Amino acid sequence: MAAAGAGLVNPVAGMAGGALVQTLGAGWALFNQRHVKDFLEDWLEHYVELATAADKLRSDADEQRVDLDEQRADLDDLNTTVADLSESLGDAAFATINHILEVVRRTAHEEKMERLRNAALHVALADGPDQPLQDILLSILDVLTVLHVRLLDCLFHPRKYGIDAVNSADFHVVGLGIGGAFKVIQQHVPGFERQDILERCLDDLINQGLVYYQEQGRDARLLGNPLPTTLAHDFMTFITAPDIRPSTGLS
């Protein structure tokens, strides 16, 4: 009897088991639905972010293409201008202006850049010295600092710096006594308060063939005046605006 009973299935238990399975199935389906829903919501959120980023990239790319097209057009215009300039100036003058531009790129000081612009104007107007001398003058300007050029300018135009003299030949009169010319320059020309800097710049100008002393020997600088040479006059003319010429202070 017990054995026979063991083989019977309790209909109530069977129903309960089926309901449990159904419940578990429904719960799992609900879990899956929620999981899928959350997943889809997250995915859609990320998709929107990615789509927005993609739109921005496309927009940036379009802007870059426009900028690139504009840059290409500007470059074409520049190449046309350069070609026209080369043809109108001639090969030699165009090469000289390119040389000037190379020096400009290595220059940060406005005062020297102004001198370089003046030289370029002389080349463009064809009123500068002949080509070999132009090359020499540009090589000098390339190595000289603003202080060198300022000192040389002072020898030609002392009144520009508040010195009551026609040119540097009169410095010993303005600064009476031994070393008068040095005192005058140190007192009036910015950047030369230190005598060692003044002496160094004078040495450089002498080595470049731009300045000389009539006196000879150890006391030349103490007793004499620094005087500009003919080459210095050519140099200052070349780097001065075309409508201005330095006064002649030559002996």
Image (cartoon, helix red, strand yellow):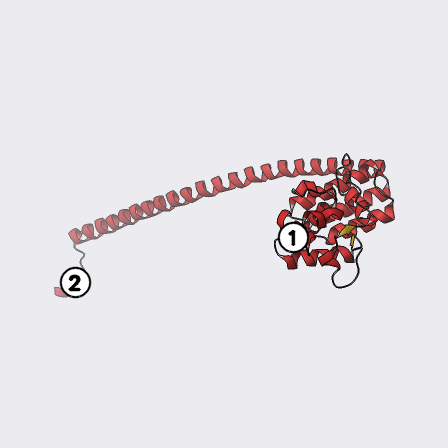
Residue 10 rendering spot, x and y as whole percentages: 16, 55
Residue 105 rendering spot, x and y as whole percentages: 69, 48
Badge 2 marks a residue whose secondary structure is helix
User: Marks 1 and 2: CB-CB under 8 Å?
Assistant: no
| Quadrant for the N terminus in the image | bottom left
User: Which residue appears at 31% of the width and 47% of the height?
Assistant: 29
Q: Quadrant of residue 162?
A: top right
**Image position of 109 with respect to 220: above or below:** above
- Res 6 label: 2
Foreground pick, 31 / 142: 142
User: Which residue appears at 64% of the width and 57% of the height?
Assistant: 195
Q: Is residue 39 left or right of residue 179?
A: left
Residue under numbered circle 1: 183
Badge 1 or badge 2: first in the primary sequence:
2
Q: Quadrant of residue 64?
A: top right
User: Which residue appears at 87% of the width and 49% of the height?
Assistant: 132
CA neighbours of label 1 inside 10 A, class few (<14), some (14 to 19), many (20+): some
Q: Is residue 51 left or right of residue 172?
A: left
Foreground pick, 231 / 46: 231
Extreme residue in the front direction: 177
Badge 1 marks a residue whose secondary structure is helix
